């Protein structure tokens, strides 16, 4: 669970509400910041433009985007490093063909494809080209998904300004005090100001963090797939499992390397390789 996103969002909303009601918690002041016309203009127009800008298939994936954004435990480099070191140990003992069974056990389709490409004795350059192209295309799709929220983040403040103009126009039209226009000046000015506020809230509290988190998940997945590519190519070239482990650990932060060692699986495989030497 992406707790930092949830904590940050709740904290931002909490600070915002506290700034409105003050430390004396005058909840009645919240009513001053609600205006139906402002909500209708900003949220309605923002959603309409997003729908007009993206295909239905991408819009239908919005619930999936939230699931991806909130899941921070799916892509763990150490897990892939351990598996690759184990595969290297098996290939070293029994040859590349022995990896086919391990490939069929894989739930990750990219990892399975990578193993099968070397099991089928394909040219190393072609294998790397296929896998790297897969990563590039995947990252482009992910960037398109994050772009949906970038679009919403950019148009929300714009429609906040549109609402401001609507309120100001109505206010100026009703400036004739003799005609009874003074009674609507307050609501018109409220619409003019509150729409800008709503636009900023949507852009910077809602849509902006979603786009940032989606790109963070993409970076995590790309890193894991790059580890798979390097590991698979090293296995195909017959590198020592212990050396492979040290090589793949360079992809993760120094703090995560634990003195150059991977997880439990990687330690066992590397120890077995060292003993065999």
Image: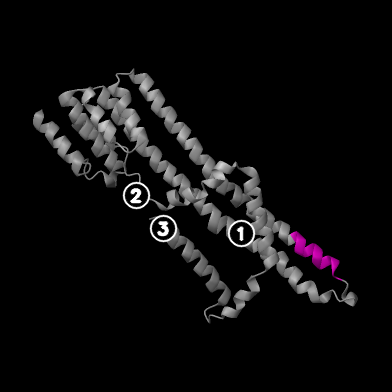
**Counting residues from the N terminus, which is met first, the one under dot 3 or under dot 2?**
3
Q: Is residue 173 magenta?
A: yes
Quarter holding the N terminus is: bottom left
Q: Secondary structure at mark 3?
A: helix
Q: Which sits in the foreground, 168 or 116?
A: 116
Q: Which dot marks residue 116?
A: none
Q: Are marks 1 and 2 in contact (CB under 8 Å)?
A: no
Figure coloring:
one colour
Provide residue 54's location: percent of width, then percent of height: 60, 42
**Counting residues from the N terminus, which is met first, the one under dot 1 or under dot 2?**
2
Residue indicated by mark 1: 200
Q: Secondary structure at mark 2?
A: loop
Provide residue 71's location: percent of width, then percent of height: 39, 51
Q: Gap in Å between the C-alphas at discs 3 and 2?
A: 13 Å
State which mark lies toward you, 3 or 2.
Answer: 2
Task: Check disc 3: other Cα within 10 Å, few if <14, some if 14-19, many if 20+.
Answer: few
Q: Quadrant of residue 80?
A: top left
Q: What residue is at 65 percent from the left and 63 percent from the top?
A: 39
State which mark lies toward you, 1 or 2.
Answer: 2
Q: Which sits in the foreground, 198 or 95?
A: 95
Residue indicated by mark 3: 4
Q: What residue is at 52 percent from the left and 79 percent from the top?
A: 23
Task: Check disc 1: other Cα within 10 Å, few if <14, some if 14-19, many if 20+.
Answer: many
Residue indicated by mark 2: 73
Range covered by the magenta-colored residues: 165-175
Q: Gap in Å between the C-alphas at discs 1 and 2?
A: 31 Å
């Amino acid at each position: 669970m992406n707790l930092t996103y949830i904590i940050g969002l709740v904290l931002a909303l909490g600070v915002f509400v506290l700034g409105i009601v003050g430390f004396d918690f005058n909840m009645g002041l919240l009513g001053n910041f609600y205006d139906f016309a402002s909500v209708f203009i900003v949220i309605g127009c923002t959603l309409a433009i997003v729908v007009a800008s993206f295909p239905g298939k991408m819009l239908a994936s919005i619930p999936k985007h939230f699931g991806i954004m909130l899941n921070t435990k799916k892509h763990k480099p150490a897990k892939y490093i351990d598996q690759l070191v184990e595969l290297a140990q098996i290939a070293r003992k029994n040859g590349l063909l022995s990896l086919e069974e391990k490939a069929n056990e894989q739930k990750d389709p990219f990892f399975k494809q990578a193993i099968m490409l070397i099991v089928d004795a394909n040219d190393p350059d072609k294998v790397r080209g296929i896998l790297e192209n897969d990563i590039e295309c995947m990252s482009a799709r992910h960037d398109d998904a994050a772009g949906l929220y970038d679009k919403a983040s950019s148009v929300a403040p714009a429609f906040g300004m549109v609402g401001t103009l609507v309120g100001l126009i109505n206010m100026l039209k009703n400036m004739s005090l003799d005609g009874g226009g003074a009674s609507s000046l307050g609501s018109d000015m409220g619409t003019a100001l509150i729409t800008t506020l709503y636009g900023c809230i949507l852009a910077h509290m809602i849509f902006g963090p979603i786009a940032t988190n989606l790109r963070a998940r993409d970076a995590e997945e790309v890193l894991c797939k790059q580890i798979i590519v390097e590991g698979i190519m090293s296995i195909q070239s017959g590198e020592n499992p212990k050396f492979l482990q040290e090589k793949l650990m360079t992809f993760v932060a120094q703090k995560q390397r634990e003195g150059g060692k991977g997880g439990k699986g990687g330690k066992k495989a590397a120890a077995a390789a060292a003993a065999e030497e």
